[in-house]
Image (cartoon, rainbow, N blue to C red):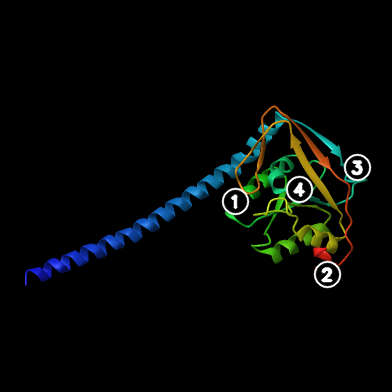
Amino acid sequence: MAARPRRLLRLRSKRGRKGRGRCDDRGTGMRSHVMRSALAEVIGRLGPAVVRVWFSTIRLRWCGGEFIHPDPRTRRNAIGVFWHQRLLGFGYSHGRFRPRILISASRDGDLIARVSGGLGCVAIRGSSRRGPVGAIRGLLAVAKDGYDLAVTPDGPLGPLHVFQVGAVYLASQTGLPIVPLTVSYGRCWRFKSWDRFILPWPFTWGVLHMGEPVFVPRDLDAAGLEA
């Protein structure tokens, strides 16, 4: 009879440990969520100022860009496209645009949207994987209001330098031309992320290049979008 209480005690002890494990997991998850939220808040508040100070040390100049003129009396709207790895350069140097930029509805996208908003680029949230219909509707609506659109055609998760059809669809629906953009730096770091994200060195030089506009036929079907 003495063995039975000991078995009960062992069972209760195991159940107690399992219960504590679940509580510990919930506590760890809650702490991680709080830490992420706090980090996002700090980056959202300080990020734009840090980017401005960082890029103020870089000698940037535009090359090309006759199509989109900074004078509002002569300028024409467009859909600017640039690779995801060069997002930071155009987030800062968008003086010739009034951009509404498509940014992923992910946690990383939350941070990018906060920083880009502080730099004057209003974010439309969504991607081919998360909220694509709402994102497209939002971009079409702001295009009708006279804003430029900005899209990273290989974002939000690649493949790297593979042009997806989203920008072509927007051009077909709005009649706005696609204007290719790129930025190069004298010296830069390349991160080991999927997009090989580029961060220029302080005090280096940079060239932002605007290519010739590409006009897309209106109301293309699926075959036309893929062509």
Disc 4/disc 1 C-alpha distance (Å): 18 Å
Q: In percent of the image, x 89 and y 43: which residue is there?
A: 69
Q: Which mark is residue 108?
A: 1
In depth, the one of 91 and 202 nearer the eye is: 202
> Image check: 105 left or right of 67?
left
- Residue 170 image offset from top left, x and y in percent: 80, 60
Q: To which residue does mark 3 refer?
A: 66
Amino acid carrying label 2: it is: Asp
Q: To which residue does mark 2 refer?
A: 221
Whichever of callouts 3 and 4 sits on the residue coming sooner in the sequence is: 3
Whichever of callouts 4 and 1 sits on the residue coming sooner in the sequence is: 4
The quadrant of the image that shows the C terminus is bottom right
Q: In percent of the image, x 77 and y 60: which residue is there?
A: 165
Whichever of callouts 2 and 3 sits on the residue coming sooner in the sequence is: 3
Kindly check if marks 2 and 1 are in contact, taking CB atoms under 8 A apart as contact: no
Q: Residues within 10 Å of mark 3 (few under 14, many from 20)?
A: few
Q: Nearer the viewer, mark 2 or mark 1?
A: 2
Q: In percent of the image, x 21 and y 67: which residue is there?
A: 11
In depth, the one of 46 and 201 nearer the eye is: 201
- Quadrant in the picture for residue 86: top right
Kindly check if marks 4 and 2 are in contact, taking CB atoms under 8 A apart as contact: no
Q: How many marks?
A: 4
- Residue 65 image offset from top left, x and y in percent: 87, 42
Whichever of callouts 4 and 2 sits on the residue coming sooner in the sequence is: 4
Amino acid carrying label 1: it is: Asp
Q: To which residue does mark 4 refer?
A: 82
Q: Is residue 173 above or below residue 66?
A: below
The quadrant of the image that shows the N terminus is bottom left
Disc 2/disc 1 C-alpha distance (Å): 32 Å
Whichever of callouts 2 and 1 sits on the residue coming sooner in the sequence is: 1
Mark 1 falls on what kind of element? helix
Kindly check if marks 3 and 4 are in contact, taking CB atoms under 8 A apart as contact: no
